[in-house]
Amino acid sequence: MGKKIALNVFYNLGIILSIFGMIWGYNNKTYIAIILFVVTAAFFLYLKLQLVKEMRNSLKNRK
C-alpha cells in the first residue's frame, strides 16, 4: 500500500512539473517543449488513472 501511495505522489509531481514546464515553454516561445510537456503530462495522468482504478478494485475485493 505504501508503494502505491509513493507512486501516486510521484505521478502528481510529474503532472505538476509538466504544467510548470508548459508555462515555461509558453513564456519562452519554445513550442516543441510545450508539446513534449503536454505528452508527458498526459502520460502521467494515464498512469495515475490506472493506479486509481487498480486501488478501487483492490479495495472492493478486500471487503
Image: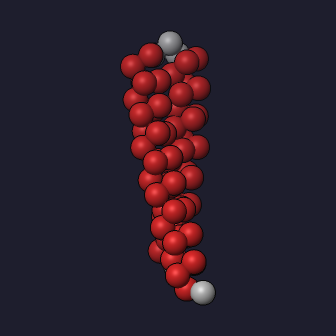
Taking the spot 58% from the left edge, 43% from the top edge, the residue there is: 16
Please provide percent x and percent y for residue 41: 48, 39
What's the image's color scheme? secondary structure
Please provide percent x and percent y for residue 42: 46, 39
Q: Nearer the viewer, residue 57 or 37?
A: 57
Taking the spot 52% from the left edge, 81% from the top edge, the residue there is: 61
Q: Quadrant of residue 8?
A: bottom right
Q: Nearer the viewer, residue 59 or 2?
A: 59
Taking the spot 56% from the left edge, 52% from the top edge, the residue there is: 12
Q: Residue furthest top?
A: 29
Relative vertical location of residue 57 with respect to residue 18 in this rendering, above or below: below
Relative vertical location of residue 7 with respect to residue 19 in this rendering, above or below: below
Q: Quadrant of residue 36?
A: top left
Please provide percent x and percent y for residue 13: 55, 51
Please provide percent x and percent y for residue 35: 42, 24
Q: Residue furthest bottom?
A: 63
The quadrant of the rendering that contains the C terminus is: bottom right
Q: Nearer the viewer, residue 51 or 57?
A: 57
